[in-house]
Image: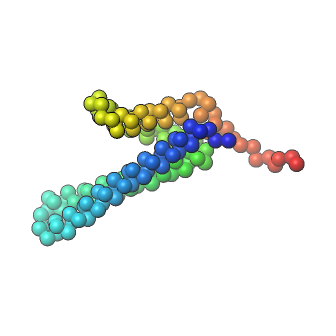
Amino acid sequence: MRPLGVTFSACFEFVRAALISLVGLAVMLVVASRLAAVAAEGNTLQRALAGFGKFVGIAMLVYAAIQLALGLGLLMRQNWARLLTMIFCGLGVLILLPRLIHLRPMSLLFGLLQLAVLIYLALSETRCYFEQKESRAPNPA
């Protein structure tokens, strides 16, 4: 049976993927509306910034797909998903550190959740759960 913490970690990855994809889509929609205005003006700098915004939106959607794959990997008991989730959560905590110093509530909550997932996935019991190979022997009837 899957531990509750692993299920929580996978759900956290799904929520992160949803939030990142929403932000990525919002960036893409804002950029798409700006592209029409920029095309009419013909300003090269604005066109370059709009292209950069589109690139950022696509990059965020790719990152959201990676987060989704990590959540599925955690649910399917894949050790690579555990390791990559730990890396991404560690980087996320480092990125949120400046915001944690200024005590922004949502950043604090998100940073604490990432730290909790990181610590849980680093526990030896969790590591053993992911490294343990299930026996494929048929059950005696």
- Location of the N terminus by quadrant is top right
Percent across and percent down for residue 79 are 58, 41
Residue at 30% of width from left, 31% of height from top? 103
Percent across and percent down for residue 128 are 63, 33
Give the left or right position of residue 54, taking residue 139 as reference. Answer: left
Percent across and percent down for residue 50 are 22, 60
Farthest residue to the front: give it.
105
Give the left or right position of residue 115, taking residue 126 as reference. Answer: left
For the residue pair 113 and 129, the one nearer the viewer reads as 113
Residue at 59% of width from left, 39% of height from top? 4
Count of numbered circles in the view: 0
Residue at 44% of width from left, 36% of height from top? 113
Percent across and percent down for residue 46 are 16, 60
Q: Is residue 69 above or below residue 35?
A: above
Residue at 55% of width from left, 50% of height from top? 72
Find residue 5 and report its image quarter: top right
For the residue pair 36 and 82, the one nearer the viewer reads as 36
Farthest residue to the right: give it.
141
Q: Is residue 89 above or below residue 69?
A: above
Q: Is residue 53 visible to us here?
A: yes
Q: Is residue 91 visible to us here?
A: no
Q: Is residue 102 above or below residue 60?
A: above
Give the left or right position of residue 129, taking residue 141 as reference. Answer: left
The colour style of the image is rainbow
